[in-house]
Amino acid sequence: MRVLPSMLIAAACAGLPMAAWAQPKPPPLDAAPAPGGPGGKPLPGAGQQPTALPTTKPPPLPPGANPFGGPGGGGRRPVSSGTGFVVAPGRLLTNWHVAEGCTELRARTARGVEVPATLTARDTERDLALLTTRGEVGPPLTFRQGPEVRRGEGVVTYGFPFAGMLSAGATLTTGDVSALSGLRDNQRHFQISAPVQAGNSGGPLLDMSGRVIGVVVSKLNAQRIAQVTGDLPQNVNFAVKGREALDFLRRHGVEPATGAAARPGLTPADVGEVAEPSTVLLRCLR
């Protein structure tokens, strides 16, 4: 049986679902996000149109699931949450669908300090966004420069799934690089087996030496595939490749730290300690 592509995907999205934690309905693969950033102002990269992005609009937080415990300026309320990480002093990288449509963005650091963040640049095709923060948010993570990522390499994700429902702190998961391309053979993505959930979007994907090799972006919608095929897929998730993130950052004047992967010798706990001071919980307010 042919599986319809529009039924395959669900974002590892920026927000939490409503009551009953039902997965949101994804748009067709060829759907383009609304033009412009918050307030409708055009941003760098705004002319690019996605062709097959496995992302959805962030669903709202359920009542009472406020990971920060209060409104923002001007009476704005948090409507969704996601993950970001430090790529340069005062600069954060996340997914565009985490920041899309937000009137205000806030970042909570590993020390529990909350700082404002502003959208500086976006790439809708890659689903990446660059944020600028007021104040120091942590040390930049180092991107892997080489060797090339291989199938079967161990990976670690670090982020904030289901903020306000699960742990108030970050969550670490482990897995492997399952394939060197994503949905529909998308060469900008890795397929990974590390579990990701709503709220992991924008978080770092790290190798076993603590180098960034990708940005968590999406997952297959297992429930919908099961409805069509009768089979439940297991841990089929996707990350934007590190080289794509590096190209995006450099195009917008950010030169992240890079380095060759050391011989894998760190444990997942060690990699988590690398990621922890540099990974932030993001909240979107409207």
Image (cartoon, grey):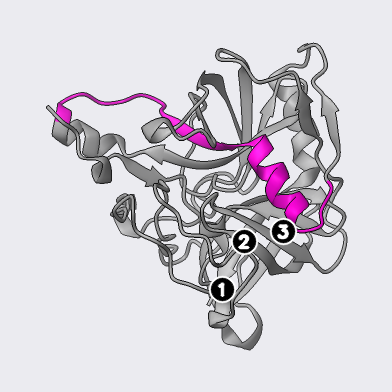
Q: Mark 1 highlights which residue?
A: 37
What's the residue at 81%, 53% (across, down)? 254
Q: Is residue 210 visible?
A: no
Q: Name the disc covering residue 58, or none.
A: none
Distance between the Cα atoms at labels 1 and 3? 22 Å
Q: Mark 2 highlights which residue?
A: 122
Q: Residue furthest left?
A: 1
Quadrant position of the N terminus in the picture: top left
Does residue 73 appear to the left or right of 253 in the view shown? Answer: left
Q: Residue furthest bottom?
A: 74
Density class for disc 3 (Cα within 10 Å; few <14, some 14-19, many ≥20) is many
What's the residue at 58%, 53% (across, down)? 95
The number of numbered badges drawn on the structure is: 3
SS assignment at label 1: loop
When the figure is inspected, residue 197 is found, relative to residue 154, above or below; the finding is: below
Distance between the Cα atoms at labels 1 and 2? 9 Å
Q: Indicate whether residue 249 is drawn in magenta.
A: yes
What's the residue at 45%, 35% (across, down)? 186
Q: Position of residue 218 (x, y in %)?
A: 46, 42
Region in magenta: 229-255
Q: Name the disc covering residue 108, or none.
A: 3
When the figure is inspected, residue 12 is found, relative to residue 176, above or below; the finding is: below
Density class for disc 2 (Cα within 10 Å; few <14, some 14-19, many ≥20) is many
- Quarter of the view holding residue 267: top right
SS assignment at label 3: strand
Does residue 88 appear to the left or right of 224 in the view shown? Answer: right
